[in-house]
Each structure stands twice: as C-alpha cells, then as structure tokens.
Amino acid sequence: RQNVNELIFALNQTIKSSKPWVQFGISPFGVWRNQSKDPKGSPTQAGQTNYDDLFADVLLWMKNKWIDYLIPQLYWSMNHRLASHRTLADWWSNNSFGIPIYIGHGPYKIREDSDEAWKNPAEINTQVNYARTLPQVHGSAFFSAKSIYQKNQDIAKLLKNEVYDKPTLPPSFEPKQKAIIEIPVVLDVKSNLNKTQISLEKPLDPAIRYAMVQGGNDLASLHDAVIHTAWVGGSRARFLEVASLNTEYLAIRWIDLYGRIVQTQVFQTPKLSRP
C-alpha cells in the first residue's frame, strides 16, 4: 500500500511540475472499506475493497491533495442489497476532503446484468439526478461509451432529453500557484448574414484556451444562453469567426487552461449586412 501511495505522489509531482494545468484524477473501485472492517467505511458488503484488497488508500490521496478529482466506480443499481449506489454516492460525497467527486456510472450493465434494476430504462437517469443533489459531487462519468452509443440508444436519448438537455463547460480548477494571464482586448465586432468576426488588439495569450461565444436578445438571457460555438485559442490569429447569431447581444467568455472564465465581454450585435 505504501508503494502505491508513493507512486500516486510521484505522478502528482511529475504532472504538476511539467504541465500544472493538467488535472490528475483516478477512478478506483467503488468501495474504500466496508464498515465491518473500519467504522469510517461504508455500510456495504462488498466482496473486495480498495484499502484491503487493492492496496489503494484513496482517502489518503484526497486528504493530501495528491489528486485533483476522483471517479469512484459505483457500478451498482440505486438500491443494490450489498452495495447500494445511493449509499455509496452519499458516502463518497461525505468523505471527499474537498476533492471534486464525479460519480462513475455503469451503463455496461444495462440489460446485461442479473440485477433486475438494470432492466429499468430510467436507472441511469435516476442515478445522475441523485448525484446532482449531493454537495461534493460535481458530475458523472460513464463506463463504457459504447454501452450507450452502440447498444442502448434509447437510454442515450433519455439522458439527452431529460438530463443533458443543455450544453455546459468542462470542470475548472484553481492552480496551486497564481497564474498571471493577459486578458484579451476586443477592438471590433462585425457581422454579415453568414458570420460574425471578432477582431483582437493582439494575438491571444497562450494561456487562453477557449473563447465561448453566446447570444441573447436581452442582457439577462446571456447568462443562460445556448453555447453557439467554442473556439480553441493559443494561436497567433488576431481575430476569430463564428456563425452569425442573429441576436441583439453577443457575449464572449474567455476561458483559460484551467477551465476558468477569466473575463466576460458583452457587445451589442452589429446590424447584419450582406457578405
């Protein structure tokens, strides 16, 4: 177990010294320890555990901030008799040491498992919605993608229609050392029927990774507006182009390597002209 601890610490140090904006996360087995072995453990009866069988002291890694996030593999149904998804989601949320938790869901079990709960098309949606009620849970991950894309497209449609009906940004995090970033200066915004061109005073700071462009017909709606495009920054270009939004206002949210919105700039959209 100490060998594994030293490996995790060394990985953290190597990644952060080379590319501090890279998030280092791990997806361990879903049970740290059963309560029968440790009063701090979860009220489960898992056949194996991280600490006792896999020599992975996951709580220590989170306590020492050796990882940036954790994705516990909670591949059981909501009310499984031996290892309830609901119980484990609660436990990880309560034992995160401030490290973001993303719940690992197991769609590979849909219609392929002896547990009858996996025949219910709403099982995954129920899990995701429950995760959203927990304070330290910041999102979900799915194993595996082909279980949704290839086999269970009806489940994919349920997820899209009921849970993921709006686009969102990837998670951000704060660097351990202060990162000084030069904020872009927009000189001009021009539109025609096909495209909107945003001209910059000078090339972007390489630490700017995205310019998220949104549109709305009033200032209040810009915050929740649909994301129309995301543009990868860090090039020497002095302008960027997006499809014309046909809205009264346009917002540009500059996003850095750490996923943080470093500035939002709002413009009244120029009246459209023909190209």
Image: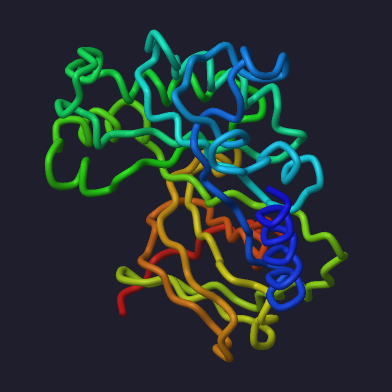
Q: Is residue 243 left or right of residue 161?
A: right
**Above/below status of 217 relative to 37:** below
Q: What residue is at 13 percent from the left and 46 percent from the top?
A: 150
Residue 72 appears in the figure: yes
| Residue drawn at x 71%, y 63% as measured from the top left | 12
Give whichever of 88, 198 is nearer the camera: 88
Q: Is residue 221 visible?
A: no
**Quarter placement of the C terminus:** bottom left
The residue lying at 50 percent from left, 65 percent from top is: 270
- Please, which residue is most extreme toward the right here? 178
Which sits in the foreground, 203 or 251? 203
Of 197 and 268, the residue lying toward us: 197
Q: Is residue 248 above or below residue 29?
A: below
- In the rendered image, residue 66, in percent from the top left (x then y), is placed at 74, 53
Q: Name the residue rendered at 73%, 42% in the picture.
A: 62
135 to the left or right of 47:
right
Res 77 → quadrant: top left
In the foreground, 241 or 153: 153
Q: Quadrant of residue 143?
A: top left
